[in-house]
Image (cartoon, rainbow, N blue to C red):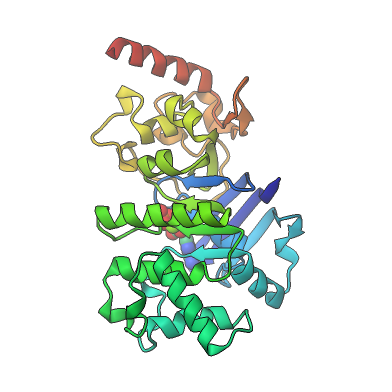
């Protein structure tokens, strides 16, 4: 069963400098119980996509097109109170800046209880018990429920935000770079924690991250975004083992010619695209070592590759994939 469908989503921001076309025709869907990754380098439109799903875009954002359905309900047509209910009850959001999301003058326990009691009629005692349970679930000492956020480390505060987001057994957890700014060991623990909870509650996960090793470990399916468009999508193992879009190859360093250093996103040479106008050709064309005439004039559609759960938006996917395989063969 499909839980979330996003179809042809386009979002622009109206800024003092003009329009910024941040998301340009993004489509993907997430099935029941699936862990889905949204990846791509900074400014590729990941957070904007998540906020559009959640209805949390700022006022100067314009949703130009797109269908967003959650369990068959059209999320774009919800009233703000319907949306408010859905957000807490069914879709949990762990924002990119979760560390700052806590109220500094309220104890972490009081904030967690408030998250519960706004939506469930629970007595003070029951809310307290539930809050302590949640603290245990996310690996926090329930005895510290009366502490204030500043008494916690960054990783612990992030766990509080996760506990609050999970208070109501959501069907979908949207986590936007939930471990940014935390040290590596804490990052691992938090990812483990989210996964464990996601398994226990049988919810689906939309994980926004540019960390390919986290994706390989935790997700079933993924989309790779660039310049507000989807470059490649499908089963994680297909994409990571056989990337067919030159951009994904660059991210993964699977193609030696694109290999700078390390296996980070910044290893794709060149600058991110300008988002001032809707793209005419492929957004990656100026940086792509495989680009041809067609790439600068015609935007490639996301098209399925034969025989696999794997789609790619690239006019030269066959040639690029063949060259990648030849290079891999030559290297072994
Ligand atoms: P990151 O990995 O850095 O979080 P992202 O993929 O989440 O990046 P977005 O935050 O969706 O990217 O941003 C996409 C583009 O939209 C960027 O060019 C960004 O500067 C712009 N943008 C994002 N939020 C706003 C905003 N509130 N107002 C104006 N422009 C914005
Ligand atoms: Mg972001």
Q: How many marks?
A: 0
**Looking at the image, is 62 positioned above or below residue 317?**
below
Query: For residue 155, what is the image quadrant?
Result: bottom left
Query: For residue 212, what is the image quadrant?
Result: top left
Q: Quadrant of the N terminus?
A: top right
Q: Is residue 149 visible?
A: yes
Where's residue 230, x and y in %? 55, 41
**Looking at the image, is 17 positioned above or below residue 195?**
below
- The front one of 213 and 114 is 114
**Looking at the image, is 212 positioned above or below residue 132?**
above
- The front one of 255 and 72 is 72
Where's residue 261, x and y in %? 23, 34
Residue at image location 57% in from the left, 68% down from the top: 56
Q: Quadrant of the C terminus?
A: top left
- The front one of 171 and 268 is 171
Query: For residue 122, what is the image quadrant?
Result: bottom right
Residue at image location 58% in from the left, 70% down from the top: 168
Residue at image location 39% in from the left, 51% down from the top: 42
Q: Is residue 15 visible?
A: no
- The front one of 241 and 11 is 241
Quadrant location, ligand no. 2: bottom left
158 left or right of 232 in image: left
Residue at image location 45% in from the left, 52% down from the top: 195
87 left or right of 236 in image: right
Where's residue 185, x and y in %? 25, 54
Where's residue 6, x and y in %? 65, 50
């Amino acid at each position: 069963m499909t839980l979330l469908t996003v179809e042809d989503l386009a979002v622009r921001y109206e800024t003092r400098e003009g329009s910024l076309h941040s998301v340009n025709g993004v489509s993907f869907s997430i099935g029941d119980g699936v862990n889905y990754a949204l990846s791509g380098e900074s400014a590729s439109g990941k957070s904007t996509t998540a906020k559009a799903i959640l209805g949390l875009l700022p006022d100067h954002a314009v949703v130009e097109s797109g269908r967003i359905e959650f369990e068959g309900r059209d999320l774009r047509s919800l009233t703000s109170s319907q949306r408010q209910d859905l957000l807490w009850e069914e879709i949990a959001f762990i924002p990119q800046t979760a560390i700052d999301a806590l109220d500094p003058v309220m104890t972490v326990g009081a904030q967690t209880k408030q998250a519960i009691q706004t939506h469930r009629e629970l007595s003070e005692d029951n809310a307290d018990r539930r809050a302590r349970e949640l603290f245990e679930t996310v690996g926090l000492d329930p005895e510290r429920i009366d502490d204030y956020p500043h008494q916690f480390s960054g990783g612990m505060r992030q766990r509080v935000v996760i506990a609050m987001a999970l208070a109501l057994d959501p069907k979908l957890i949207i986590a936007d770079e939930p471990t940014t700014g935390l040290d590596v060991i804490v990052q691992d623990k938090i990812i483990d924690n989210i996964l464990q909870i996601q398994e226990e509650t049988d919810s689906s996960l939309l994980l926004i991250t540019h960390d390919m090793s986290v994706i390989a470990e935790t997700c079933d399916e993924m989309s790779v975004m660039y310049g507000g468009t989807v470059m490649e999508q499908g089963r994680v193992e297909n994409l990571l083992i056989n990337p067919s879009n030159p951009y994904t190859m660059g991210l993964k360093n699977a193609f030696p010619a694109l290999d700078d250093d390390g296996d980070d996103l910044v290893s794709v040479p060149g600058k991110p695209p300008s988002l001032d106008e809707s793209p005419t050709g492929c957004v990656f064309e100026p940086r792509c070592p495989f680009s041809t005439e067609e790439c600068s004039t015609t935007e490639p559609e996301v098209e399925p590759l034969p025989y696999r759960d794997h789609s790619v938006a690239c006019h030269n996917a066959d040639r690029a994939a063949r060259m990648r395989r030849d290079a891999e063969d030559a290297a072994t």
